């Protein structure tokens, strides 16, 4: 089944807020080989002007994940997860994520294209903090392989 | 800072342990990242690294170079080749970070990420603002 072209332009309801924990930031930092003191030491982060430890740039994917789950679960999307390959990823930041942030992500599908039997779906998850200010937008392009 | 300057060059040794650690930290438990049989069932030679782990590691030399003298405003990659992580030997990822562009907003750092002599990310670009 091909990806439903009507998905393009669809905006999903915001997902439940994600509270960024200090130990989660440290755990993620260790997992991506991040050794900067800003990622691990509250003192170092505060000295640099941040409220708490700073998350590595790609931590935003953890917040984005729940929105992509919404997309894959959409009944009329026609996206078979077993055929999905992650093609491209982008993050556009207004500021870094720090521990203590309560982040809310909202997904919109910006593009659905067909290319030689495959489909390419581009989805943007806009992430805002508790005050509603933009923090980061995570943009994924998923390639959905067609029937062989 | 001039176009073409290499700001960082680092090699990271990734093992299956790294993949398990990343799975837990990120919540991405797709079994192709820890089970050879599952990876082989979808036509892969064996377990491969999460693309997002490669992306996460690749930006670290830029993070370290930047320190507190600026911030990352945009980071993008294309996933072009899988990084196969051998159970015994792991995989070495080499990151070369080079200045691609300098303008009023800051700079664009271009990343070349290689595994086994081949690049695994395309158009890997980090936009930084400098304070």
Image: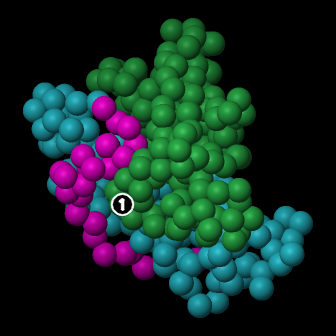
Chain colours: A cyan, B green
Residue at x 58%, y 46% (from the top left corner)? B86
Between B33 and A43, the one lying in front of the other is B33
Q: Residue A112 in the image: state x and y as whole percent.
A: 72, 69
Q: Residue A107 in the image: state x and y as whole percent.
A: 49, 69
Q: Residue A7's quadrant in the figure?
A: bottom right
Q: Residue B11 in the image: state x and y as whole percent.
A: 51, 26
Q: Is residue A24 magenta?
A: yes
Residue at x 48%, y 34% (from the top left corner)? B13
Residue B92 can be seen in this image: yes
Q: Is residue B10 above or below residue A66?
A: above
Q: Residue A132's quadrant in the figure?
A: bottom left
Residue at x 20%, y 57% (from the top left corner)? A21
Neighbor class of circle 1 (other Cα within 10 Å; few <14, some 14-19, many 20+) is: few
Residue A43 relative to residue B119: left or right = left
Q: Is residue B6 above or below residue A6?
A: above
Residue A4 relative to residue B85: left or right = right
Q: Is residue A111 magenta?
A: no
Label 1: state its secondary structure: helix
Say which quadrant the C terminus of chain A sits in: bottom right
Residue at x 56%, y 14% (from the top left corner)? B6
Say which quadrant the N terminus of chain A sits in: bottom right
Residue B121 relative to residue A1: left or right = left
Q: Residue A42's quadrant in the figure?
A: top left
The magenta stretch is A10-35
- Disc 1 designates what residue? B24
Q: Residue B41 in the image: state x and y as whole percent.
A: 69, 71
Q: Chain of mark 1?
A: B
The residue furthest front is B88
């Amino acid at each position: 089944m091909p990806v439903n072209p009507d998905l393009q332009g669809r905006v999903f309801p915001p997902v439940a807020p994600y509270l960024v924990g200090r130990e989660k930031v440290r755990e993620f930092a260790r997992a991506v080989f991040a050794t900067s003191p800003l990622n691990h030491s509250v003192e170092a982060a505060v000295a640099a002007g941040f409220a708490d430890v700073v998350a590595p740039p790609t931590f935003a994917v953890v917040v984005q994940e729940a929105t992509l789950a919404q997309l894959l679960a959409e009944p009329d999307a026609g996206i078979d997860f077993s055929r999905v390959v992650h093609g491209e990823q982008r993050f556009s930041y207004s500021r870094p994520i720090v521990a203590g942030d309560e982040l809310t992500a909202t997904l919109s599908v910006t593009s659905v294209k067909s290319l030689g039997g495959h489909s390419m779906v581009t989805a943007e998850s806009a992430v805002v903090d508790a005050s509603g200010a933009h923090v980061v937008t995570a943009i994924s392009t998923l390639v959905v392989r067609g029937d062989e | 800072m001039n176009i073409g300057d290499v700001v960082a060059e680092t090699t990271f040794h990734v093992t299956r342990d790294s993949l398990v650690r990343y799975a837990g930290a990120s919540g991405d438990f797709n079994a192709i990242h820890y089970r050879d049989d599952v990876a082989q069932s979808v036509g892969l030679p064996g377990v491969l690294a999460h693309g997002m782990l490669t992306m996460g590691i690749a930006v670290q030399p830029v993070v370290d170079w930047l320190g507190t003298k600026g911030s990352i405003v945009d980071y993008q990659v294309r996933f072009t080749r899988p990084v196969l992580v051998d159970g015994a030997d792991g995989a070495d990822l080499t990151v070369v970070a080079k200045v691609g562009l300098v303008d009023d907003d800051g700079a664009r750092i271009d990343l070349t990420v290689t595994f086994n002599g081949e690049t695994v990310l395309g158009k890997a670009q980090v936009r930084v603002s400098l304070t």
